[in-house]
Image: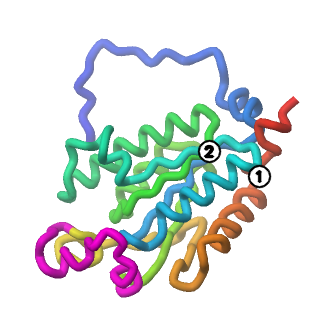
């Protein structure tokens, strides 16, 4: 549990409600939390979905695991403790994005159920949408665009999820969306995500159609 170190601080509520911000943007904000092994397709699908949403007039933003580790979380490694802190921080950032009215798409391995559940608990009901981007480790290893699986198998990388014995991946038990990327191409995965957003009332016309 993270300890609150700062003292003598007060939460200051704003004068604009989250409902007003959402209405301004013509959408119901949410966090699409992509989880899955390295090279399963998380970032590729996230970026493709963001592009389609923007083209349709919605306000979306991708928070990508590697990109975040270049800045906000550059002081964190891949130990279990650092992984937990990595997800805690990005969960708080995603919460702020949702509160601002955005559709935020996060792309993190986030291997531990407990950490993902803690992020879900930060948000209101219906705002956290867990997306299991699923491909067998053999398929991910064959893709291996960064060469990480081969390095892990040679022992050059430790704590590598799905390969290192000390770095397990805990699959979601009941994700809102399950994408089998060994069976579906990127465009069909994006279509499945869009259908979920449309069917569940997240896409309300977009900022271009707000009057």
Name which of mark 1 and mark 2 comes first in the sequence. Answer: 2
Estimate the x, y position of residue 127 in percent, counting from the top left: 60, 48
Where is residue 1 drawn, in percent x and y? Answer: 26, 44
Q: Which element type, helix, strand or loop, lies under badge 2?
A: strand
Whether residue 101 is situated above or below residue 190 in the rendered picture: above
Q: Comparing marks 1 and 2, which lies closer to the viewer?
A: 2
Image position of 48 with respect to 179: above or below: above
Q: Are marks 1 and 2 in contact (CB under 8 Å)?
A: no
Q: Secondary structure at mark 1?
A: loop
Q: Quadrant of residue 101?
A: top right
**Disc 2: which residue:** 60
| Residue, far top | 8
Q: Nearer the viewer, residue 210 or 121?
A: 210
Per the rendered image, the range of residues in magenta is: 138-159
Find out whether residue 146 is within the magenta segment: yes
Q: Which mark is residue 104?
A: none
Q: State the count of labels.
A: 2
Identify which residue is drawn at 26% across, 76% down: 149
**Which residue is rendered at x = 56% and y = 44% of the image?**
61
Where residue 5 sits: x, y (%)? 23, 26
Q: Gap between marks 1 and 2, in whole Å?
A: 15 Å
**Crowding near the residue tagged with mark 1, few <14, some 14–19, many ≥20 C-alpha atoms within 10 Å:** few
Mark 2 crowdedness (10 Å alpha carbons): few <14, some 14-19, many ≥20? many
Quadrant occupied by the C terminus: top right
- Which quadrant would residue 78 be assigned to in this image? bottom left
Above-or-below relation of 103 to 48: above
Which picture quadrant has residue 20?
top right
Q: Tell me what residue is drawn at x 49 percent, y 51 percent.
A: 120
The residue at which mark 1 appears reads as: 201
Q: Is residue 144 magenta?
A: yes
């Amino acid at each position: 549990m993270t300890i609150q170190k700062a003292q003598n601080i007060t939460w200051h509520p704003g004068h604009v409600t989250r409902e007003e911000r959402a209405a301004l943007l013509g959408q119901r904000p949410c966090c699409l939390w992509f989880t899955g092994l390295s090279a399963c397709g998380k970032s590729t699908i996230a970026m493709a979905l963001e592009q389609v949403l923007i083209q349709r007039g919605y306000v979306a933003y991708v928070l990508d695991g590697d990109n975040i580790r270049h800045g906000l979380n550059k002081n964190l490694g891949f130990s279990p403790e650092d992984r937990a802190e990595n997800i805690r921080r990005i969960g708080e950032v995603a919460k702020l994005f949702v509160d601002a009215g955005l559709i935020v798409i996060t792309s993190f391995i986030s291997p531990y159920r407990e950490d993902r559940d803690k992020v879900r608990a930060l948000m209101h009901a219906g705002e956290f949408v867990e997306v299991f981007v699923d491909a067998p480790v053999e398929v991910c290893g064959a893709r291996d665009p960064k060469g990480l699986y081969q390095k892990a198998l040679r022992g050059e990388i430790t704590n590598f999820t799905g390969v290192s014995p000390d770095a397990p991946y805990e699959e979601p038990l009941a994700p809102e969306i399950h994408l089998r990327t060994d069976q579906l191409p990127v465009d069909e995965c994006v279509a499945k995500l869009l259908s979920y957003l449309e069917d569940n009332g997240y896409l309300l016309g977009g900022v271009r159609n707000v009057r």
